[in-house]
């Protein structure tokens, strides 16, 4: 989920004045330690599924949710401001058990609705998940985040081009509490030596 940033990178310190948002000094969005990355001779990421990886690993997300989100207002810019907001998500199973799809919606300050969609597919040969994100801004689908779950934690990696430079992006899903799963996103522009956690959300099931 490479979600929409409402503020540009050059106006990191500006606070949003609408009540649906809250801005403040940066807090630790996430501090989860990440494993060292492996690369093949061409520089592509080497990603291997965990022994327990399964096409059932995202079943916990099926249903309707409210999400509380927090993101830094600029990425890889030593930004010290963040924004919080709420969104809604509906997730559905599909592909005969080999995938699922969600729709994320968020009210924007100008009254319009931002919509994003995640397509998740499971490869039974490699036992790896691929997570694709697209949104109402248009443009190409983001490169898939690839990975698997182990002990309730899912790590999914991709190489991409963001904030004017090549980066590696990781998504982390924590389903150790499946009633309140937590998602986080981090960027690295030094091949995984250091990471900046720039986005997180917690989902709450709608009964």
Image (spheres, grey):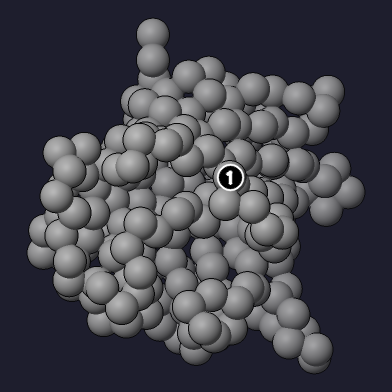
Residue shown at 66%/32% (left/top)? Answer: 101
66, above or below 160, in the image: above
Q: Residue furthest right?
A: 125
Residue shown at 53%/50% (left/top)? Answer: 1
User: In this rendering, would 78 be left or right of 171?
Assistant: left
Residue shown at 54%/85% (left/top)? Answer: 165
Q: Position of residue 135 (x, y in %)?
A: 59, 47
Which of the image's four quarters has the C terminus? top left
Quickly name the residue at label 1.
136
78, above or below 22, in the image: below
**Label 1 secondary element:** loop
Q: Position of residue 48 (x, y in %)?
A: 72, 62
83, above or below 11, in the image: above
User: In this rendering, would 22 be left or right of 186?
Assistant: left
User: In this rendering, would 69 be left or right of 118?
Assistant: left
Q: Position of residue 6 (x, y in %)?
A: 35, 57
User: In this rendering, would 146 be left or right of 85?
Assistant: right
Q: Could you say which is closer to the camera, residue 199 or residue 135?
A: 135
Q: Residues within 10 Å of mark 1 (few under 14, many from 20)?
A: few
Q: Is any part of residue 36 visible from this angle?
A: no
Q: Is any part of residue 190 visible from this angle?
A: yes
């Amino acid at each position: 989920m490479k979600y929409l940033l409402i503020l540009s990178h050059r106006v990191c310190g500006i606070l949003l004045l609408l009540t649906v948002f809250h801005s403040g000094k940066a807090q630790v969005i996430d501090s989860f330690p990440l494993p060292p990355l492996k690369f093949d001779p061409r520089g592509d990421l080497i990603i291997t599924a965990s022994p327990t990886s399964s096409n059932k690993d995202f079943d916990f997300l099926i249903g309707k949710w409210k999400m509380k989100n927090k993101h830094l207002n600029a990425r890889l810019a030593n930004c010290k401001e963040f924004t919080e907001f709420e969104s809604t998500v509906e997730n559905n199973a599909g592909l005969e058990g080999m995938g699922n799809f969600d729709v994320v919606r968020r009210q924007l300050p100008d009254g319009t609705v931002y919509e994003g969609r995640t397509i998740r597919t499971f490869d039974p040969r490699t036992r790896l998940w691929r997570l694709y994100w697209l949104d109402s801004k248009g443009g190409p689908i983001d490169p898939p985040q690839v990975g698997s779950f182990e002990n309730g934690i899912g790590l999914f990696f991709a190489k991409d081009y963001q904030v004017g430079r090549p980066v590696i992006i990781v998504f982390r899903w924590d389903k150790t509490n499946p009633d309140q799963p937590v998602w986080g996103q981090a960027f690295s522009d030094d091949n995984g030596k250091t990471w900046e956690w720039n986005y997180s959300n917690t989902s709450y099931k709608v009964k």
